[in-house]
Image (cartoon, helix red, strand yellow):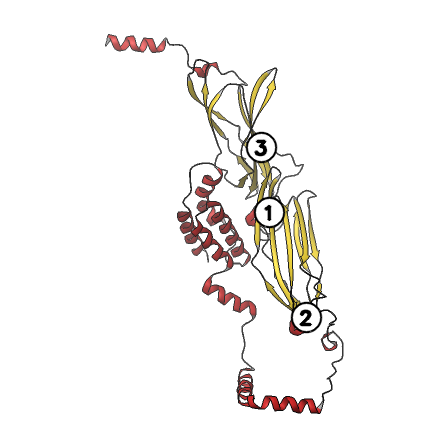
Amino acid sequence: MVRMWIVLLCLLTLPARAEMTIEPGDLRLWVEVEERGALPFTDEMVLVKIRGTYKVPITLENLKQPDLMGFGWMQLGPDEWFYTRERGQKVVNLERIMALFPEKAGTLTIAPFTHELTLSEPDGTRFTHRLRSEPIEIEVVEAPEPRTTWLPARDIKIEDRWSNAPEQLVEGASALRLVTVTIRGVQPETMPPMPELTGAGAMIFPHPPKQITSLRATGPMTRVFWRWTIRPERGLSGYVDPLEFKYYDAEAREARSITLSAQKVAYAGVEMPVGQREGAKIIKPKTDGVRVAAIAGAVTPFAPLLGLIGGLIVLLRHARFASWVEMRRRWWRIVGTPEERAFKRAARGGDAANVRNAARKLIAADITAGRYGDDAEFKTVFEGLDKALYGGNGTASVGAFAQAFNTARKSLI
């Protein structure tokens, strides 16, 4: 018993631990929110910097971000470490840039970040020290448009290119139209879906869209590519309708739109037939009797087949055929939509970033198609994957995420 008291007395009289040597200002961690001069709308990008200064030696470190409840978020690149000098003393600096996207209006709180540090004293003693930032409150205003059409962009650029002159095509040839939309400051999954290109006298074949996102200090830069193969219908000339693109200019704080003008599509030297122009008189062409007789003689051997086709036309003339859009929907019900197939391919590939991107595109397509109203049900599904991708908290199970995502989606549609 006496021995135990002696040990306790020795422990109490030992020198103070190394934590006591940390002076105020030696270690700092704080969050800076970009000054914009106006309250942000929901889904509008808010840039934040997590900054730290360290005047004592650091052996190991781990900056942990909190559960950013009420925000979508992206880390814009790796943490940056650099040195500065303060009154002749070398100071280690940390900077992490993130893009936050408020998901609801009201007062939202950026919870404290925690920096777990392993510090060293000159004698080699190591100890753990936790450094926390102060919480930050942000006021958010409800967006003036529905989430399905709301696009608050910091910067936007649209390019409209054709593989060859669409009004001077070689007979039998087609033109490839490529519209490239580059937007800074929006989440990749909220990029607008590929529009339906319409027109008259032209055959339009859409290609699957492609999308590329790069992370920059000023926000994510996402570029989408929309492609259509277009050619005149039945050898005649036609046109494609204008494309209107609406967005909210987050820099100028006003709604704007960009219109790509209508375009004529024709073979070289071919004009729109008189009978197809509005208000024009239809004139029946003259026929040559000898030529008609020759054609009739050539067609005679195929008379039974032509009679069968004619009978079918008579029988089915009142039948209602599905439109091209309806046929496409029926086909998608069998093989899956392009977004569904892309998600399956990404899940089979096993890459967490690809499967997340494919899942967000599928959600956007579902919302656009009116299958459900918002993505609130998927919030918990993405949490584990996002923490693994952006928070550095281990690896994610792509298979488990895909299964949970499909289960949540089936419960909505």
In the depicted structure, whether residue 376 falls above or below residue 200:
above
Residue 49's disc is: 3
Q: Position of residue 122 (x, y in %)?
A: 46, 14
Residue 171's disc is: 2
Q: Where is residue 339 in the image (x, y as percent from the top left)?
A: 51, 56
Whole-angstrom CA distance, mark 3 to mark 2, is 58 Å
Quadrant position of residue 319: bottom right
Secondary element type, mark 2: loop
10 Å crowding of disc 2: few (<14), some (14-19), many (20+): some
Secondary element type, mark 1: strand
Whole-angstrom CA distance, mark 2 to mark 1, is 37 Å
Amino acid type assigned to the residue bearing label 1 in the image: Thr
Front residue of 114/390: it is 390
The residue sitting at 44% across, 15% down in the picture is 18
Instruction: Give the residue number, with chain letter if any, for mark 1.
Output: 222
Number of numbered markers: 3
The residue sitting at 56% across, 20% down in the picture is 91
In the depicted structure, whether residue 268 falls above or below residue 43:
below
- Label 3 or label 2, whichever lies nearer to me, is 2
Q: Which of marks 1 and 3 is nearer the N terminus?
A: 3
Whole-angstrom CA distance, mark 1 to mark 3, is 21 Å
